[in-house]
């Protein structure tokens, strides 16, 4: 029997839910070190006590109001010098998801998703590279869904609820997000990567000189 791999879910086939974690990326790293997780395993937390952003930045989120996830990947078909493809497919997957609710989300380098002038989501990708291959990749995503009040020191946050006025079911949002990411990941593995890079370029916010 011939099976079409495009219809076999990779991202989201297994979801590990937690009420609270220090960091979903840190928990994913622990799983990789001490267990044997399958590719596409998703770690979700309702709250992070030590949520991490890019560099030394922190990721702030109200409890049970947003999507806080990390995804374990084994992207053997992506060479280390092509590692930016991971950021490209994740960014486009998040934009695909947001397009289900409202059009117009954009990508701001290196790792943010914006709607208008406001930040909707952040991405933290941690790759483990050995010799000429990416051994594994941990993709962390923080996506603002139902939160409407943010710390004053955050310059420009927004959320789906702020944009539309609607309250969203987080389980439904997670399923839609993972489906969008899964489709984009398969396009990286089996599709025309040049088309993916072109679409990414069109979504980019042009930086001011």
Image: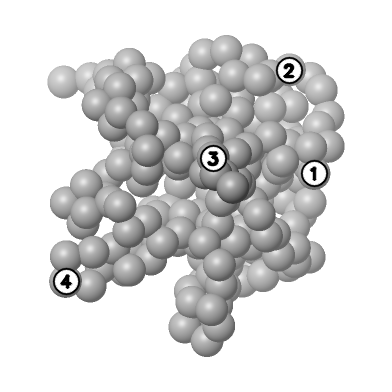
Disc 1 + disc 4, Cβ < 8 Å: no
**Mark linked to residue 4:** 3
> Mark 2 or mark 4: which is in front?
4
Choose the circle earlier in sequence order: 2 or 4: 4
Residue 118 image point, x, y percent: 51, 26
Q: CA distance from mark 1 to mark 3?
A: 27 Å
Disc 3 + disc 2, Cβ < 8 Å: no
Residue extending furthest toward the top: 103
Q: CA distance from mark 3 to mark 2?
A: 37 Å
Q: CA distance from mark 1 to mark 2?
A: 18 Å
Residue 79 image point, x, y percent: 22, 54
Mark 2 lies on residue? 164
The residue lying at 52 percent from left, 27 percent from top is 95
In the rendered view, would you say 23 is above or below 88?
below
Choose the circle earlier in sequence order: 1 or 4: 4
Secondary structure under tag 3 reads: loop
Secondary structure under tag 4 reads: loop
Secondary structure under tag 2 reads: helix
């Amino acid at each position: 029997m011939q099976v079409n791999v495009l219809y076999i879910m990779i991202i989201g086939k297994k979801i590990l839910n937690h009420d609270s974690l220090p960091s979903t990326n840190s928990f994913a790293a622990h799983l990789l070190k001490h267990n044997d997780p399958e590719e596409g395993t998703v770690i979700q937390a309702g709250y992070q006590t030590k949520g991490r952003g890019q560099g030394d930045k922190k990721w702030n989120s109200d409890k049970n109001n947003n999507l806080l996830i990390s995804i374990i990947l084994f992207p053997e078909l992506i060479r280390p010098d092509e590692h930016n493809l991971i950021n490209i497919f994740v960014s486009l997957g998040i934009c695909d998801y947001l397009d289900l609710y409202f059009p117009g989300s954009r990508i701001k380098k290196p790792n943010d998703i914006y709607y208008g002038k406001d930040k909707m989501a952040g991405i933290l990708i941690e790759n483990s590279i050995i010799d000429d291959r990416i051994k594994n990749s941990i993709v962390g995503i923080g996506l603002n869904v139902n939160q409407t009040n943010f710390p004053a020191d955050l310059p420009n946050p927004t959320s789906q609820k702020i944009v539309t006025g609607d309250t969203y079911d987080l389980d439904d949002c997670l399923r839609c997000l993972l489906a969008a990411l899964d489709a984009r990941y398969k396009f990286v593995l089996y599709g025309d990567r040049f088309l993916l890079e072109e679409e990414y370029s069109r979504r980019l916010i042009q930086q001011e000189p």
